[in-house]
Image (tube, coloured by chain):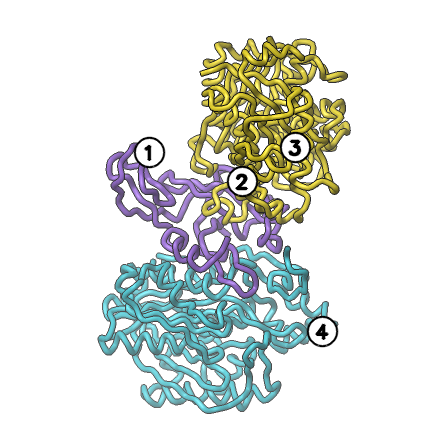
Chain colours: A yellow, B purple, C cyan
Amino acid sequence: MRDVAIIGIGMTDFGEMWNDSLRDLFVKASLEAMDDAGVDHIDGLVAGCMSPGLFAGQEHIGSLMADYLGQAPIPGVRVESACASGGMALRTGIAYVASGMHNVVLCGGVEKMTDVSGAQATYALATAADQDYEAFHGVTFPGLYAMMATAHMHKYGTKREDLAQVAVKNHDNGLLNPHAQYRMKITVEQVINSVKVADPLNILDCSPITDGAAAVIICPLEMAKKMKKKPVVKISASTHATDTIALHQRDDITWLKSTAEAAAKAYKMAGVKPEQIDFAEVHDCFTIAEICVLEAMGIVKKGEGGKATREGLTARDGKFPVNPSGGLKSKGHPVGATGIAQIHEIVTQLRGEAGRRQLKRARRALAQNMGGSGGSAVVHILEVL
Amino acid sequence: MITPAIVRRNTPHRYRMEAQKCAACGKVFFPPRLVCTCGSRKFKAYALPSEGKVITHTVIRTAPRGFGDEAPYCMGIVELKDGSRVLCQIADCEPHRLKVGLQVTIEFRKIQEAGESGVIAYGYKAVPER
Amino acid sequence: MAGIVGYGAYIPRYRIKVEEIAKVWGADAPSFKKGLMLREKSVPGPDQDVITISVEAARNAMKRAGVSGAKVGAIYVGSESHPYAVKPTGTAVAEVIGAVNDCHCADLSFACKAGSEGMFLAYGLVKSGEVEYAMGIGSDTSQGAPGDALEYSAAAGGAAFLMGLKNVVAEVECQYSFMSDTPDFWRREYMHYPRHGGRFTGDMAYFKHVRGGVEGILKKAKGKPRDFKYAVFHQPNGKFPMKMAKDLGFSDEQMKTGLLVPTLGNTYSGASPLGLSAILDEAKPGDRILMCSFGSGAGSDAFIFTCTRELPKVQGKAKKTRDYLDTNPFYLDYGTYVKFRRKIRKNVED
């Protein structure tokens, strides 16, 4: 297996992109990534997208994107793992490159979510839950995470304010990210008093409905070293794990087993301990998610995610910054694009190109992208050479 | 998604809470599966008990398509007396009554319908003691 | 002897008070309450209909009977608010109680006496030996047009009776039916709400046919009103059954246990069956019960039951009718009521 590096990144602004279609978004991010890499040809394309069918009435987007990127007849495929589709696109591309099947591969993620009504979007997202035993009963994603929050608060004494602090911290970060959808400062009180969505989660605990795309170009590490255009970012681990997609079938409602499994494998693959990771981009689709992810990744002990957040561990100036991009919460969450947008932020930080939000210590970082209520998790560890 | 075939296919477990028990390791599955996590493919029929307690809960205030008229509604994960778990709505329950440990009984309720003229899907909901 | 081997009731938790409806229509609540002798009515939740109510009543009947659903050879659900115009209610009940596939099923309608019709058929089938057990259910989520007098009373609930020959809790001693073609109350195909003949529904319909049923069965059984511990008649409001009782020679004492309408409302096909289930919850071995339903159009089914020594053994095996009726009701405002009953015109969901 060949080592793989990232040589180009691109992303659109995240938000309500009324003038851009699904393909516009994907192609814009892809062209930016190709320009950044300095390539005008790719050998293959992997598009992560959760539900172009329900959100945009379009399937078969692997070919569509290859064509509109001017790259047909290269192989193009869409991969899907709910909200982890972006991470899965990168992992799939890595398999192509590492195996020697292709050299230069574009891994993109996209979602066009605002062409449908709020109720339709809620329905489309809920298809990532167990259709027959969760969605059938009228549960929503905020509802599933709300049940994780209720259980976490009951079991560990996590406070409502701790949940809110995740949003406050991520909005503080997003304020400095020009691509972010909601660049505004919020307070714990505002979160707690915002509109209720699924108790105990309010609207400011939830990531928004977003249009957007992100793309990265990967190639064999040795090839990247020869290009020497920008600092070379090596992918030192790429892992993936699954769990029951139905929340109620898990022994512990508060434990993200797929994330724990993928993270443990990633540390092993990269040959590092959690303490050796400088920062992380994680899947904070809801405030409670970031708390549970911190625990599952072994950054804090079980039950201490809320406390750690309250004490500032994960702040931009904390010991272990989490979501310097603003996370899904502030940056926006075009579901299929999220996993790649996380990689975009990490590469930007590792290259030292993050401007006002540049972290002091940014040599090695982890990206955790999660599907559904944790039925899938993809973890990548990147380091700058 | 509600279609005649889906409604019919789900009748045994949605109407009668029919589950199954692995003949090898005794693990209970609801809904029934074709293979156990232990690898066995032999199961015995098993009906879930109708009483249990809420182990976690929420109140859905922003509902998906088809549930708007019922919002806000309570939902939870219910641990039945034998330890099996189901996720369902908690009907006839004021949000302030929701708590971990709330005792509930399974009742037969309408869950969804395919529009005004389509088929109606029935199933189980949990109901607290009045 | 054939009779009831298990019975069960179900009443939704929601209620609306007469005052709440009257205030919307500018009506005088005290005079309505006095005139109808009813204070409030039950309302089905948005997730309840005749199928769900029938299922819960049937489950309670099965709990009391303690027999396997597979032995139930016939199920009849009488209602004027079946959720489907075409597609039976009874099949869903059969699936839930495990009576499939070896079972005869039919939905019945005859305005408010559809429930007692099911009891009549179930009784006849077990008595003849055609099937071992048969179930009759009367259940409704009654409709009353907004602003109409019926809106104050049209309620939701149902009761199920499993008939059989073994371990009978209340024997059917006698049965009699009475009918004529009388258009006192009707609902035409495709119409939302029933219509009625106003004052014509009294003497010419309800009183004539209940009297016909009761006098007919007393004659057939060679009995007198004083022979019964309990009597229950169809109860569209509180006034009609009490006036009927007085005219026929039944006392308040005989009527009070089965008279649920003051806080339940008129559950149409479920009305006299629910009254009977409330009586069975209280009755003792040897007690005799006279029941007479009424269905517009018009007719009545009368039964005489004698409670056996088996009855006390099953009374506590399922929730009692009064528990459903009296425990912690949830009162709706008129807005929520019309939302639950889908009377609000909305945009089609996209």
| Horizontal side of residue C325 vs C313, given as left or right | right
The quadrant of the picture occupied by the N terminus of chain C is bottom left
The amino acid type, in three-letter code, at marker 3 is Ala
In terms of depth relative to the viewer, which is nearer, A267 or A100? A100
Q: Are marks 4 and 1 on the same chain?
A: no
Q: Position of residue C66 (x, y in %)?
A: 29, 59
Which dot, 4 or 1, sits closer to the camera?
1
Which dot, 1 or 2, sits closer to the camera?
1
Label 4 environment density (alpha carbons within 10 Å; few <14, some 14–19, many ≥20): few
Q: Which residue is mark 4?
A: C28
Q: Is residue A153 visible?
A: no
Helix, strand or loop for disc 1: loop
| Horizontal side of residue C302 vs B73, given as left or right | left
Q: Which residue is mark 3?
A: A213
| Horizontal side of residue C102 vs A363, given as left or right | left
Disc sitting over residue B57 in the figure? 2
Find out whether the residues at labels 2 and 4 contact each other: C-beta distance under 8 Å: no
Q: CA distance from mark 4 to mark 1?
A: 66 Å
Which dot, 2 or 4, sits closer to the camera?
2
Q: Is residue C339 above or below residue C80?
A: above
Q: Position of residue A306 (x, y in %)?
A: 60, 23
Q: Are marks 3 and 4 on the same chain?
A: no
Which dot, 3 or 4, sits closer to the camera?
3
The amino acid type, in three-letter code, at marker 4 is Asp
Find out whether the residues at labels 1 and 2 contact each other: C-beta distance under 8 Å: no
| Horizontal side of residue C132 vs A213, given as left or right | left
